[in-house]
Amino acid sequence: MTTTALLTDQYELTMLQAALRSGAAQRRSVFELFARRLPEGRRYGVVAGTGRVLDALADFRFDDEALGFLRDRQIVDAATLEWLASYRFSGDIWGYPEGETYFPGSPLLVVEGGFAEAVVLETLVLSILNHDSAIASAASRMTGVAAGRPCIEMGARRTHEIAAVAAARAAYVAGFASTASLAAGHRYGIPTTGTAAHSFTLVHDSEREAFTAQVRSLGAGTTLLVDTYDIRDAVRVGVEIAGTELGAVRIDSGDLPLLAREVREQLDELGAYETKVIVTSDLDEYAIAALAAAPVDGYGVGTALVTGSGHPTCGFVYKLVARSSGPRTSMVAVAKRSQDKTSIGGRKWALRRLSARGVAQAEVVGIGEMPYDDGDDRALLWPLVTAGERVYDDSLLQMRDRHEGSVAELPLQAKQLSRGEPAIETVYERAAPA
């Protein structure tokens, strides 16, 4: 096992040490992860990374090496080291399942347990969910405007090597069809794809020689990269070599809408009616939308995807919203009141308010208890961990289906790329006094 325990900011452990001394460490506490706002101009967000959080939680153990590091650096005292040595999360975690859409204030993760065992998870959960949800949110916009045409994730060469694997997973949750990353394919079972770069053409004495070698090796169904030299010549040579069974051609530069039309016309003239046209080259959701009327069969997306298309983080925060005063006392709401960073105290529950036709109308967040369900609404918080044991383990295919269904129930303005307010409002409902 490789421990994830040091994926932690130092202040979490110094808070822990002080809380152990004050006696507050064992106070029952509720932490919530949420976004105060969506990234500017976005109409909705998509949750991804929940399963990775639970995987990381299973490995959150302070082993001898981690404890030795903390001891050598004198980061915490001996009593705290002793407490960390036996750390096991024993509380409950609720959350939005992966693939679900979210809005400002959505309680995406609710962690209930002792203050000490919950506070040390802050950096771990924020780092995973902020990254993966940013990628999934961007991917959802891309697959939305792609309108059924497959999107291929190809961003591993544009980001950190570990982040690349997580990005491929998040993109797949949000509807991408495949990835170029073999590591993502191996770890998560995501379909992989890829054929050749410009270097393969350049290393041969001619384009014809390169295409011949590729077709002989990979078969006529391969994808030929046709913009190394002259695109029209390349398409002609490709069809001559592979025949009309040529799988696809890829265009990686130039005026993509214009070139796609010209290539499609040429392929049809050559009888290669089933040969697909794939486009790449710094695509984002806006470029994909601009290609909607072009005869394109698929999109390869790299840099824009793995950087969240301008928003590489979701701005999630992890805040204490309720705590007890002692071992047997009732919970009291607590909240930060500082300007511009206020939060709402109290344990939250959430449901998606739907019309009789199944269209989302509001994100209803109940404070202290589940908000009223009129019969058409849908609960959003699922149990993820109960008494320290993981109870959530959806497959990626289930996450993809959930994403598709959640986006489908949003009002039409959610799909617009123009800047605007969240597609639905967030409404808070407080429990009636006893």
Image (cartoon, grey):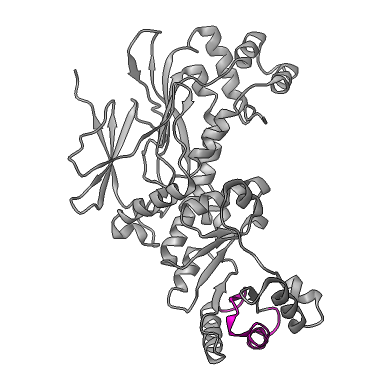
Q: Quadrant of the N terminus?
A: top right
Q: Residue at x 38, y 10 (%)?
A: 325
Residue sitting at 47 percent across and 12 percent down? 26
Image location (x, y in percent) of residue 388: 48, 22
Residue segment shown in magenta: 228-255
The answer to whether residue 145 is above or below residue 402 is below
Side of 263 where 6 appears, left or right: right
Left or right of 315: which side holds 236? right
| Left or right of 32 on screen, residue 164 | right
Look at the image and say whether residue 141 sits in the magenta stretch: no
Farthest bottom residue in view: 269
Image coordinates of residue 49 in percent, x first then y, are 51, 42
* Screen quadrant of the C terminus: top left
Q: Position of residue 257 (x, y in %)?
A: 51, 79
Q: For the point 65% across and 54% down, which residue is it?
A: 182
User: In the picture, residue 247 is in which quadrant?
Assistant: bottom right
Instruction: Tell me if residue 39 can be seen.
Output: no
